Every structure is written in structure tokens, then in C-alpha cells.
Image (cartoon, rainbow, N blue to C red):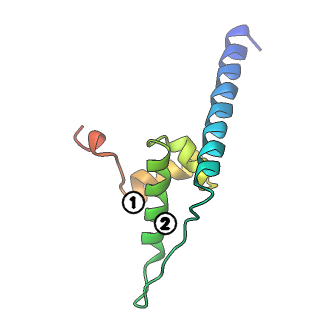
Amino acid sequence: MSSKHQAELTRILVLLDQAESLCKNLIEERADSAWIVNIPKEGVSLREVEREAILQALELTGWIQQSAAILLHISPRVMNHKIHHVHHLLPAKRKSR
């Protein structure tokens, strides 16, 4: 492996470690306020529950998709797909582009 590739790999590992630490800190900070789904008598779609969970995770992490994915125990690729293709969620500053 070239030294350039090794340096890139090291940088990726450091970034992943930082993202994991951020998520652990967020989880510890929020441990007192457990997230509970309140299902109304008339019901609610699972899609809407998922959408709300994704929005909350994104808001908690400052819209850092990788960190939000870690919070929800899904891959960053799945998170990206759900944001862009399932729920069409984008922060307001990006919608105008």
C-alpha cells in the first residue's frame, strides 16, 4: 500500500472514530430523555414515524448524515437513500440550490 493510500486510510479511520465519539456523547447527553413514539388512537403510518426519527437524528447531529446514521443504527448509505429518495429531506439552506 502506498504511503498516500495509507495516509488517506488513517484519516478515514480518525474521522470515523470522531463521528462515533460524537454519537456516544449525544446519546449520553440525551439518556435522560428517552424518545418514545406516541401512537394516536387513529394510528400513524410507520413511514411518518421513520421520517420523524430521521429528522430528529439529523437535528441532533447538525445534519451530519454519518453521525445520524450511527444514532439510528443504519448505514450511511441507507441514511442517504432515505433522506433523498424516500422522505425527500434536505435542510432549508440546501433546498434552494
Residue in view at x 65 percent, y 21 percent: 11
For the point 57% across and 49% down, the residue is: 69
Q: Are marks 1 and 2 in contact (CB under 8 Å)?
A: yes
In this view, the mark in front (1 or 2): 2
Q: Residue under circle 1?
A: 87
- The quadrant of the image that shows the C terminus is top left
Name the residue furthest left.
96
**Can you identify the residue that label 2 sits on?**
50
Task: State which quadrant residue 22 falls in.
Answer: top right
Vertical relation: 78 (above or below) 34: above
- Above or below, 62 against 35 in this view is above
View extreme (right): residue: 1
Q: Nearer the viewer, residue 19 or 10?
A: 19
What residue is drawn where x is 41% and y is 55%? 85
Q: CA distance from mark 1 to mark 2?
A: 9 Å
Identify whether 25 is placed above or below 18. Answer: below
**Quadrant of the rendering where the N terminus is positioned:** top right
Q: Amino acid at mark 1?
A: His
Q: Earlier in the sequence, mark 1 or mark 2?
A: 2
Outermost residue toward the top in this view: 3
Local secondary structure at mark 2: helix
20 left or right of 45 in image: right
**Front one among 47 and 37:** 37
Q: At which x and y percent is residue 13?
A: 70, 28
Left or right, 67 with respect to 39, comes to: right
User: In what element is the residue under mark 1?
Assistant: loop
Side of 12 where 85 appears, left or right: left
Q: Nearer the viewer, residue 29 or 47?
A: 29
Mark 2 is on which residue type? Answer: Glu
Residue 81 placed where, x, y %?
48, 52
Q: Against 20, is 90 above or below? A: below
